[in-house]
Amino acid sequence: MPEFRPGSVWLVGAGPGDPGLLTLLAQHALTLADAVVHDALVDRRVLALARPGALLIHAGKRGGKPSPRQPDIARRLIRLAHEGRRVLRLKGGDPLIFGRGGEEALALVAAGVPFRIVPGITAALGAAAYAGIPLTHRRLAQTVTFVTGHTAGGADVDTIDWAAVARGSHVVVGYMALKHLASVTARLIAHGRNPDEPVAVIAEATTERQRVVETTLAGAAADAAGLEPPALVVVGEVARLRAGLDWLGALDGRVLDADPLRLALTRDTG
């Protein structure tokens, strides 16, 4: 394993929740870090792996709720590193996919602080796998697009080329899209997506509290109204395969349905 040097910062993805999804490098960093600056979404079981005596610093950013300012987080990382600590910046999912890891890395470069980036399982991959939804499928989906559901300030996103997203991708995955789900789905429908297209909304993915709402593009906003973030939205025909691939539900006694699998095996998309 690489040396975690004092005075350096590791930007590490903690995965979507289940501590079993940590990488070996992430676990290695947890055993050595002097200070762990962590997001709100990092599972408590992951934090429990930090070495005894490590300083645990909450720096979670939650949309629509009071949160530390991004410049303040970066300054804290720099200050801790300048104090000679091994600093672990622990982020939910992957640090470079809607995780602001790029912003923090640029701040470290400007301050002359050495750093390492350790990727993690991003929410889209973890949530879809634990819901039994393949994000790509040879016959159903050859393209997948990740989009954010709100701006840095929590407002609705109006800078995305929704027409290109709607036309150009078989599967659309919305991060942080629950708050503005009605707007997101309306835009996709307005640009040609079928209102009856399957949708899965996955809340608290890969944890014991995971909930999945199976719905349609037209009904998603209403059907998911009772869910709380964090939640991920998967739009596309692949969501229909959950009926036959919900391995987690099968462990709890859910009966799997082979019909959607037959559809996927026989459908020819060229």
Image (spheres, helix red, strand yellow):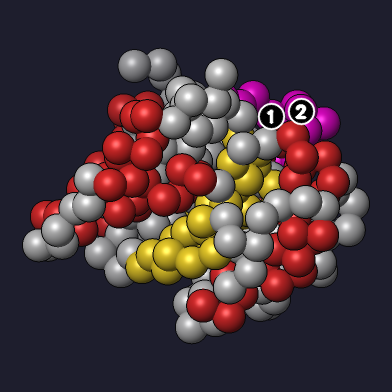
Q: Residues within 10 Å of mark 2 (few under 14, many from 20)?
A: few
Residue that numbered label 1 is attached to? 113
Separation (CA) of disc 2 from disc 1:
6 Å
In the figure, residue 100 lies in which quadrant?
Answer: top right
Viewer-proximal residue among 251 and 105 = 251
Viewer-proximal residue among 93 and 136 = 136
Image location of residue 79, percent across then percent down = 67, 46
Q: Looking at the picture, does residue 83 appear above or below residue 117?
A: below
Image location of residue 143, percent across then percent down = 61, 29
Q: Are marks 2 and 1 in contact (CB under 8 Å)?
A: yes
- Apparent side of residue 3 relative to residue 8 in the rendered image (left or right): left
In the figure, residue 144 lies in which quadrant?
Answer: top right
- In percent of the image, x 90 and y 52: which residue is there? 159
- Apparent side of residue 74 relative to residue 237 in the rendered image (left or right): right
Q: Secondary structure at mark 1?
A: loop
The disc at residue 109 is 2
Query: Which amino acid type is marked by label 1?
Result: Val
Number of the front mark, 2 or 1: 2
Q: Residues within 10 Å of mark 1 (few under 14, many from 20)?
A: some
Q: Secondary structure at mark 2?
A: helix
- Apparent side of residue 120 relative to residue 248 in the rendered image (left or right): right
Image location of residue 53, percent across then percent down = 32, 52
- In percent of the image, x 77 and y 40: which residue is there? 167
How many badges with numbers are in the image? Answer: 2
For the record, the magenta segment spans 103-117
Question: Which quarter of the rendered picture does the C terminus lie within?
Answer: top right
